[in-house]
Structure formats: structure tokens, C-alpha cells
Amino acid sequence: MNITNLKNKIFILVFLAVLTLPWIAGGVLRLVAPEAYKSISVVETEKRQMQEIEWSNLLNTGESVSGFIDDRIPFRFTLISWYKSLNDAIDGQYQKAAMAIGQKLYTAKEDTVERGETNKPIVPGEQVQDQVEEAADGNFYPLSVYQDVIVGREGWLFLYGENEIECYTGTNILSEEETRHYINLVNQLQGICQARGKQLYVYIAPNKSSVYSQYMPTVDIATNFRRIQQLYQRMQDEATAPFIYPLLEELQASSYHQVYYKYDSHWNHLGGLYGVNALYAAMGVEQTDPAQWIVGTQDADKYELYTYMGMPDSMVTHNDVEATVDYRPEIEVKGLDVEKMICHTTSNGANEKKLCLIGDSFRVNMMPYISKDFTNCTFVHRDYMSDVKSDIKNADIIVIEAVERYDYEAFHTIQRVINIF
């Protein structure tokens, strides 16, 4: 046996050991000492449910299988902690050097690509986004990431993971095949809804980094014509159902009010109302000026990104405030509980059609307003939609919502609604 073959076999054995030993050791430890296994495997700072396998969608994508395995890797917490500690130690030294070098070398660069290529066609928020970028601080600010959280300018926090930074830098452009698949799904469900006399709306809530880019650090932008802009263009041209992306509304509002939380990835109550207005514009439902419902300010008690960083409450900076919104106080709503994954409401609102909104956590700050404008509503997190099949079938209006970084989840939801019908 020559040396090369021996080395190859050793590498193969080591590779197999790396793949199998954690599962074997983890399985034994889980049987012998389950609490010890949990303490070194479960990432407790992740405020979400573990991924489950979407058996009904396996023929379209194996993404749920990959996520199912990733969430259950033995010693996950320990391995992530080791990685973060090593990464933070290296990154700390890098940031010191980057700040010193960057301040000397960085100058804001003008976009040398023709606008016809970078922002064609104009999509919601483009004109306002140009103004925001021009007004943003042109000084170099290094990228600093801790536990998947970006520490931005003036203390603002942003998600780094969960596809957010890829959306911001333009490195996750959809392929033509993926785009066509998404358009076909929308058109297929729209055909079903039209045949049953229902209205369908697909709604993508903007990422925080899309609205407050002036607080983001200095990073390389692969393209200014980003994933959501390209998808929006194609949907306007080829989809038969309304496709809503209210970046323009949120950017315009952010010039006068704070519409996203400083230390959380979501829009606040006022941002949610501006988002609802964009939905109503597509529906042809009466809109009001959100500012007219502001009755004061309150502590913005949302610090999700500090939690992601693993910071105890004693270290959290409580200096974020938001507008107190008292929307249509004369209307009474029964059953509203924004903490529930499935929520049914009734009210004496003006619109008597039954509305079903299937979405993610961005739906929460939309619920208090929609529930006052529609007499009968079902709000459900997409992970629980199998429990509201009858509500979906009986709805007059179906709204499928997802945040920009999880836009693909909206289309997975569309497939599941098609399956229900």
C-alpha cells in the first residue's frame, strides 16, 4: 500500500468519525444523563421552535430535513459556544485593526453602475432609500458581530443570521428557476381563490436593515438590485395576485417616527400600523393617518437581540421608546390575544368579510388594527395552520405574510394552503 492510499483512508476514517461519534456519544449521554445532554446541546437563547420535517413538501425541497438535523446535533450548544468564543477573540483583534486602517483609507464610494442596471424598475422604497443612503453617515464603521447580532451605529442592533445580512448585501439573489416556481405557486393559489370567490394577498414585511440602513456598519454590497426588489418586479409583471412589500411606507414613516425597535428585529406598534395601511391600500380598504392615533410614548419593552446575545437583564440598556397607539378606540374587539399562535377575533368593525392572516411574528403588531377593521378574523402562525383548515376554507380574504429574510416561508405557506384546498 502506497503512502497516498494510506493517507486517503486515514482521512476517510477521520471524516466518518467526525460525522458519527457525536451522534453515538450524544445518544448514550441522552439515555444516561438527559439533563447533562440538554445543557451542552440545546441552545437556550434561540427563541423559536425547533425545525420539524415538512413531509408534504419533501418532493419540492429537502430544506426542512436539513433544518431538522441541524437543530438536533448533539453538543450543539457547546460547539456553538466554542466557535463563538474563538471567533469573538479573533474578531476583537480584527476590529481594532480595521477601525484604525478603515478610518484612514475609507471614503464613501459613488455607485459607478448605471441606475438602469441597479434599480430597474423602481420598486417601493427606492427613491426614499436613495435619500436615506445620501443622508447616512459616510464614515467607516467596522462590522462587529456577536452571537449572530450586529452591533450597529449609535447602539442599534441588527440580525446577522437568519438570511438578514445576505438580503442586505445582495448575495442571495433568487435563481430563475426559484423565481418561476414562486410565481407559479402564487398564480395557482390565486386561481383556486378566484374560483371560490376569495381574495388573496401575499405580503412581505421589510427587514429592519432595509428600513434603517443608516445604522448598519460598513459592508460590501454585491448588488443594489437586491433579491426582494427583483422578486417584487417579477411578481408585478407576472403574478395574478397582489404582492405587497411596504418598504416605501416604512421609510417615509421613519423620517418622522421610529417604526422599528432599536434592540429587536421587528417593527413596533406604529410600524405595524403603517404596514397595515399598505395592505389596506392593496385591498381598497379605507386608510387613516397612523399619526392621528398616537396618544403618547411608552417604554419599548422589546429586547430580543440582547437575548440572542445571551446578555442578562442587568446588562440590557433600557433606553428605547415607542409611540403609544390607540387605534379606533370606539370599536370593541373580543378574543384578541397577540401571544397566541392561533387567535380568533370578532368586532363591530366596518368590514364584514372573514379574514384569515397566516404569517410569522411580524403579524403580531398588525393584529390590533386588522381585528378592529374586520368583524371576523383568524390570525395564525404558519407553524399551526394545519389546525385552522376550516378557517382558511371559509375565509373571504386570505393574507399570507412573511418577513423579508424569510420570504421563502411565504411560498411554503402558499403550497400548504393549496394542499388544504
Image (cartoon, rainbow, N blue to C red):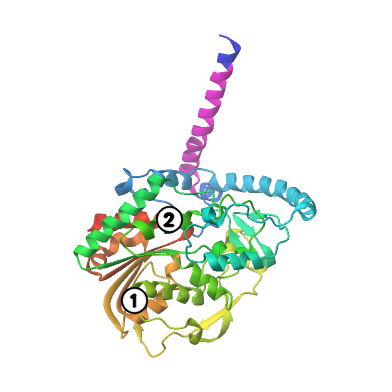
Q: In the picture, residue 149 is in which quadrant? A: bottom right
10 Å neighbourhood of mark 1: few (<14), some, or many (≥20)?
A: few
Which residue is the site of mark 1? 284
Seen at 51% across and 70% down, the residue is 267
Q: Is residue 246 left or right of residue 218?
A: left
Seen at 35% across and 83% down, the residue is 333
Question: Which disc is residue 231 wearing?
Answer: 2
Asked if the stretch drawn in magenta spans residue 261, the answer is: no
Q: Residue furthest top?
A: 1
Query: Is label 2 in contact with label 1 (beta carbons under 8 Å)?
Result: no
Region of the chain picked out in magenta, as a range = 7-34
Q: Is residue 237 left or right of residue 306?
A: left
Indicate the position of residue 93 as horizontal and vertical percent values. Answer: 76, 48
Residue 419 visible in rendering: yes
Disc 1 is placed on an element classified as loop
Residue 156 visible in rendering: no
User: In the rendered view, would you say 273 is above or below 207?
Assistant: below
Indicate the position of residue 285 as horizontal and vertical percent values. Answer: 34, 78
User: In the rendered view, would you say 57 is above or below 237?
Assistant: above
Q: Nearer the viewer, residue 22 or 286?
A: 286
Q: Amino acid at mark 2?
A: Leu
Q: Nearer the viewer, residue 31 or 72?
A: 72
Q: Is residue 387 left or right of residue 35?
A: left
**Gap between marks 2 and 1 measured at Cα:** 23 Å
Seen at 38% across and 43% down, the residue is 62
10 Å neighbourhood of mark 2: few (<14), some, or many (≥20)?
A: some
Seen at 36% across and 71% down, the residue is 282
Question: Which disc is residue 419 wearing?
Answer: none
Quadrant housing the C terminus = bottom left
Q: In the picture, residue 400 is in which quadrant? A: bottom left
